[in-house]
Amino acid sequence: MTQATDATKSASEPCLLTHDEGRVRVLTFNRPRALNAFNQELYLALAEALRSADADPQVRVIVLTGAGDAFTAGQDLTEMASMASATGVIGFEVLLDALEAVGKPILAAVNGLGLGLGLTILLHTDINFMADEAKLKCPFVTLGVVPEAGSSFLLPHVLGYQRTAELLFSARYMGAKEARETGLVLETLPRAQLLPRVLELATKIAQQPPAAVRETKRLMRHATRGEARAARAREAEEFKARMVSPEFQEAMRAFAEKRAPNFD
């Protein structure tokens, strides 16, 4: 999560880059000055790109990665406070719905820092790769809020309850080696080799019978889909309540004032 903005970015520069490598659609988060933090525009752009790729018969595999040195810093804090009183479309929820609906395999190339959604999005992708120097963090409690994206269910499902509790309660960083050992990512490798390796596997998957691949993903995801949706609903309710809490207000003030928060 970050407060950086794209104030100096050209208005014509897209927040999401799209290109095809054969039958592989590569989607690149493109807000590098903001460490690829998600604002409403990027949430909606990625959701639409996922729907488009899933509907395109020429695309068989989707790859997610970030521009520059970060994967994504998660929610852009310049928009976070306004989410508590939002009455329109919430881009975060639109994106999660789109991710959940994609039937084609999604591979993640975690090229750098991943905060908040930068970690929890990996619970909705199918195969994850991570650069050796990259690191992940869930800073939710530090901000006075709770986990999101169904991670209160999905993260213990992947890591186990105690490791998840320690990771979330302490809000510490997880390095690439630990992410691989816990099963959150499949492989770690030098950043220069990351995207080529991901594209190598994506291309191999794209050569398989597409309907069989799609149905295999559906069957594997079926067991956890209902629980993940229920977790998302619980999280969304509590997240909104936390965003008007004194703890959240103090966390936001401390961040803006560049000081340690005081929760006493």
Image (cartoon, rainbow, N blue to C red):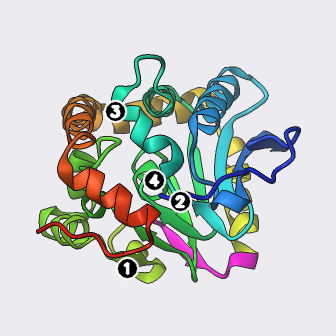
- Whether 188 is among the magenta residues is yes
Q: Which residue in the structure is indicated by mark 3?
A: 84
What span is colored magenta in the figure? 185-192
- Left or right of residue 3: residue 227: left
Camera-near label (3 vs 4) is 3
Task: Work out whether mark 4 precedes mark 2 in sequence or the reverse, and give the earlier one.
Answer: 2
Q: Nearer the viewer, mark 2 or mark 3?
A: 3
- The residue at the point 74 percent across, 23 percent down is 57
Secondary structure at badge 3 equals helix
User: How busy is the neighbourhood of tag 4: few (under 14 within 10 Å), some, or many (20 plus)?
Assistant: many
Can residue 75 be seen here? Answer: no
Counting from the top left corner in percent of width and height, residue 139 is at: 34, 63
* Location of residue 112 in the rendering, given as x and y in whole percent from the top left corner: 60, 70
Query: Which secondary structure, mark 2?
Result: loop
Where is mark 4, residue-wise? 122
Using the image, tell me which numbered label, if any, was put on residue 73: 2
C-alpha separation, residue under disc 3 versus residue under disc 4: 25 Å
Residue 134 among those drawn in magenta: no
- Secondary element type, mark 4: helix
Instruction: Name the residue at the top extreme.
Output: 88
Vertical placement of residue 29 versus 261, above or below: above
- The residue that label 1 is drawn on is 178
Q: Amino acid at mark 4?
A: Leu
The kind of residue tagged 1 is: Glu
Question: How far apart are the alpha carbons under marks 2 and 3?
Answer: 20 Å
Above or below residue 40? Residue 111 is below
